[in-house]
Amino acid sequence: MMLDTAFCLERFAWHAGRHADLSVQSVALASDPAYVSVRNRFSTTLAETVTCSDDGAFITSWGYRLGTTEDVESAAARLAFLLAALPA
């Protein structure tokens, strides 16, 4: 069965949005590749674009593996840590 990366990215965006200091800037599910753009609310430079690989890994634009679709909440928490955000 093929992974629904769009659904996984929607879940990632929801979990990232629960962090007090993070703001989901865009969710581009129709682009190739689909991605979620997230930034720290208090900084214009602390931002990251996240994609979901076919094997279910959330990957930053610079190639850092945040986690997998098996634990989306932890992957979003790792991004929050990288963007210096407070916990959910």
Image (cartoon, rainbow, N blue to C red):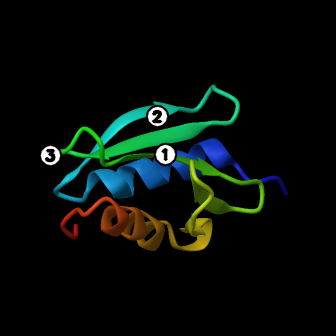
Which corner quadrant of the image does residue 81 belong to? bottom left
Spatial CA distance of label 1 from label 2 is 7 Å
Q: How many residues crowd mark 2 within 10 Å: few (<14), some (14–19), many (20+)?
A: some
Amino acid identity at mark 1 = Glu
Q: Secondary structure at mark 1?
A: helix
Q: Is residue 29 left or right of residue 55?
A: left
The picture places residue 88, in percent across and down from the top left corner, at 22, 67
Question: Which residue lies at the image location 64% right of the left edge and 52% below the top edge?
Answer: 52
Judging by the rendered image, the residue that carries numbered circle 1 is: 10
Q: Nearer the viewer, residue 3 or 51?
A: 51
Q: Upstream in the sequence, badge 2 or badge 3?
A: 2
Q: Are marks 1 and 3 in contact (CB under 8 Å)?
A: no
Amino acid identity at mark 2 = Val
The picture places residue 13, in percent across and down from the top left corner, at 41, 48
The picture places residue 42, in percent across and down from the top left corner, at 14, 46
The single residue placed furthest to the right in the displayed view is 1
How many numbered marks, from 0 up? Answer: 3
Question: Which residue lies at the image location 20% right of the left edge and 44% below the top edge?
Answer: 43
Q: Upstream in the sequence, badge 1 or badge 2?
A: 1
Q: Are marks 1 and 2 in contact (CB under 8 Å)?
A: yes
Q: Nearer the viewer, mark 1 or mark 2?
A: 2
In the rendered image, the vertical position of residue 27 relative to residue 14, given as above or below = above
Q: Nearer the viewer, mark 1 or mark 3?
A: 3
Question: Which residue lies at the image location 65% right of the left edge and 63% below the top edge?
Answer: 57
Judging by the rendered image, the residue that carries numbered circle 2 is: 27
Q: Secondary structure at mark 3?
A: loop
Which corner quadrant of the image does residue 39 belong to? top left
Query: Which disc number belongs to residue 42?
Result: 3
In the rendered image, the vertical position of residue 23 relative to residue 3, given as above or below = above
